[in-house]
Amino acid sequence: MKQIITSLLVFSSITLFSQRVNFKKNKVFFDKKEILDYEIGGTFGATNYDLYEIEPHKRIIVLIDNNGGTPREHLDDYVQIKFITSGTNADVRGNIIDAIKLLVKNEVITENGKLDESKIELFVKNYDENISNRTIISR
């Protein structure tokens, strides 16, 4: 019985503190709160997400979800993050949702959906894996 209660407490604490990112009707929601607008586009093997501040409607970041040339294999997927206002880039492993969580966790994007430009340089320094410069994709 103690094991069941302990398991329930651990599981509830994990789900209680997890962050949720959802995309609905060109809006990005973080923990059920609308933080950004987005537009989607892309080419073969990559999907672009242009992220906009809600007010004023200003493009701040372009996320490029790249499948690494292997659409059914997710271990080599990465996201190119292009900061429009500063002209800097970062490549991080994972998918779009992981990238947005990482940006919010490091307060590059605030929970109100504003870009904090003072945190971009530190984010790039800590998380850029330079994947796109060392990856050759043959199609």
Image (tube, rainbow, N blue to C red):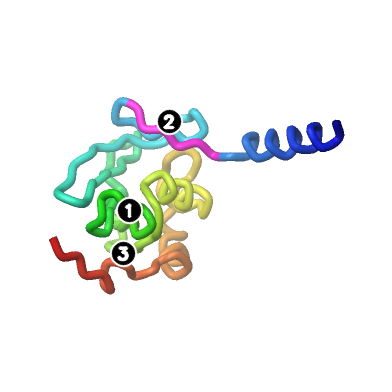
- Mark 2 vs 3, N-terminal side: 2
**Numbered range of the magenta stretch:** 19-24
Residue depicted at x 32% and y 68%: 131
Q: Is residue 13 visible?
A: yes
User: Is residue 50 rendered to the left or right of residue 120?
Assistant: left
User: Residue 130 lies in what quarter of the image?
Assistant: bottom left
The residue that disc 2 covers is 34
Quarter containing the C terminus:
bottom left
Identify the amino acid type marked 1.
Glu
Front residue of 106/48: it is: 48
Instruction: Look at discs 1 and 2 and give the one toward the viewer.
Output: 1
Q: Residue 22 magenta-drawn?
A: yes
| Name of the residue lying farthest toward the right | 2
Mark 1 burial class by Cα count in 10 Å: few <14, some 14-19, many 20+: few
- Mark 1 vs 2, N-terminal side: 2
State how many labels appear: 3
Mark 3 burial class by Cα count in 10 Å: few <14, some 14-19, many 20+: few
Front residue of 62/117: it is: 62
Mark number, residue 23: none
Q: Residue 67 magenta-drawn?
A: no
User: Is residue 110 rendered to the left or right of residue 2?
Assistant: left
Residue depicted at x 30% and y 41%: 52
The spot of residue 69 in percent (x, y) is 22, 58
Identify the amino acid type marked 2.
Glu
Spatial CA span between label 1 and label 2: 31 Å
The residue that disc 3 covers is 88
- Mark 3 vs 1, N-terminal side: 1
Residue depicted at x 29% and y 30%: 26
| Name of the residue lying farthest toward the top | 25
Q: Secondary structure at mark 3?
A: strand
The residue that disc 1 covers is 73
